[in-house]
Image (cartoon, helix red, strand yellow):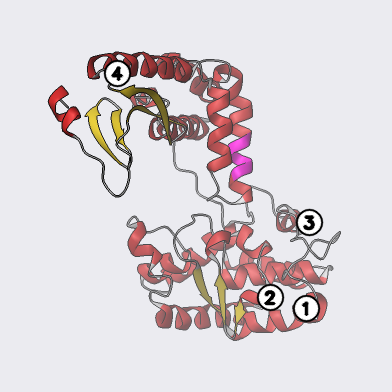
Amino acid sequence: MLTDKEVRALQPREKKYTVTDGNGLVLEVRTGGQKYWVARTWEGGKERRKQIGKYPEMSLKVAREENILYRRSAEQRRSVLTMGELVDEWIRRKLDVSEEHMKTITLRLDKYILPGLGHMPVSEITPQDILAVCRLAEDSGFLETAHRVRGLIGQIFRYGIASGYLHADPSGSLRGALKASKTAHYPTLTDKAQIKALIQGIDDYPQPVMRCALQFSLLTFARPGEVRRGRWAEIEGDTWAIPDETMKKKGRGGHLVPLSVQALGVLARLRLLTGDSLYLFPSARSRNRPMSDGGVRTAIRAMGFTRDEFTAHSFRSLASTVLNDAGFARDWIEKQLAHEDEDQVRAAYNRAEYLDQRREMMRWWGEWWEGLR
């Protein structure tokens, strides 16, 4: 902290500078020798500065008192911020998720979080309030959703802490308070006759673009959102370079998918149908938009498979099962599935990891598909 003697001794320099007294109070010394007291606070993740007086007209003691009053006023402004307002700001800044994931987030906000908490000041929300919201999902039997809702509330509160609105995350106290959920795995086919029936159903699918989408999904086992938003510009020879912004998790540097001869054959047929479009699989209504996220799911149902038997994500489960059974290294399979590396920095620089090995594995996968046909 400064003393009166130190404040008096401060001399101007070629450039304006500040010295800190503490608790957000600084003294700004300008090139002409003028000295101004400035109070600093943080709101919405941004520093706010307010000039509260000039020295020596305002003494050090009075400046400290004024600084405390100003900070209390800022605290009061933050205390009336509602959960709904914090959610709105959090969503505006949450730019690193896919369209599908944002739909899921919005659904959980609208169904569980905002009806119960949206009107409440964030500073008054307790762990019991959050537990009551999570129990809405838990009591309906949606145990996994209850845990997801708690995690989502935690993300929002942690954003509030980083932005200067809050000092603590009350959702952290709920660990162990909810019923344990069983990890849900996507269904898949294990019987060879069923797998052959799936491949035959795909080959017989009457709509040619959707037929290609189903075949490409099976041969690349990329995520459904990555397939439907795939672009022709991303096809580089015998490799599909999925950009970072299309991935489920951003900041990983994108993902490389080696394309087998069979996958390239699908693309050759598809180019005759959609080669004039930006997207591999454009919407039937507009060539400038990707096909809907329910297109592949609807086609699978039309082939006679129920949601308990096979889904759009099940191509990935099927590939993982078959490749593991065939003895391929788990690291190669996990990398090809683009499962997130716990070390995000490491992951961002390793999109080509095991590329040669994965290229050989994908060649085998294409031949396996061809053999079952």
Q: Position of residue 27 (x, y in %)?
A: 28, 31
**Could you tell which of marks 4 and 2 lies nearer the N-terminus?**
4
**Could you tell which of marks 3 and 1 lies nearer the N-terminus?**
1
Kindly state the secondary structure of the residue where label 2 is placed: helix
Query: Which range of residues does the magenta coloring cover?
Result: 102-106
Q: Quadrant of residue 119?
A: top right
Asked whether, in this view, residue 125 is left or right of residue 35, the answer is right
Residue drawn at the location 65% of the way across and 67% of the way down: 230
**Which residue does the numbered mark 1 point to in the structure image?**
275
Between marks 2 and 3 in the image, the one whose residue lies nearer the viewer: 2
Q: CA distance from mark 4 to mark 2?
A: 63 Å
**Which residue does the numbered mark 3 point to in the structure image?**
302
Of residue 43 and residue 151, the one placed in the foreground of this image is 43
Q: Position of residue 263 (x, y in %)?
A: 63, 79
Of residue 12 and residue 288, the one placed in the foreground of this image is 12
Quadrant assignment for the N terminus: top left
Magenta part mainly helix, strand or loop?
A: helix
Tag 1: amino acid: Gly
Tag 3: amino acid: Ala
Tag 2: amino acid: Trp
Q: Position of residue 145 (x, y in %)?
A: 52, 33
Residue drawn at the location 53% of the way across and 36% of the way down: 90
**Could you tell which of marks 4 and 1 lies nearer the N-terminus?**
4
Residue 301 within the segment the image draws in magenta: no
**Which residue does the numbered mark 2 point to in the structure image?**
232
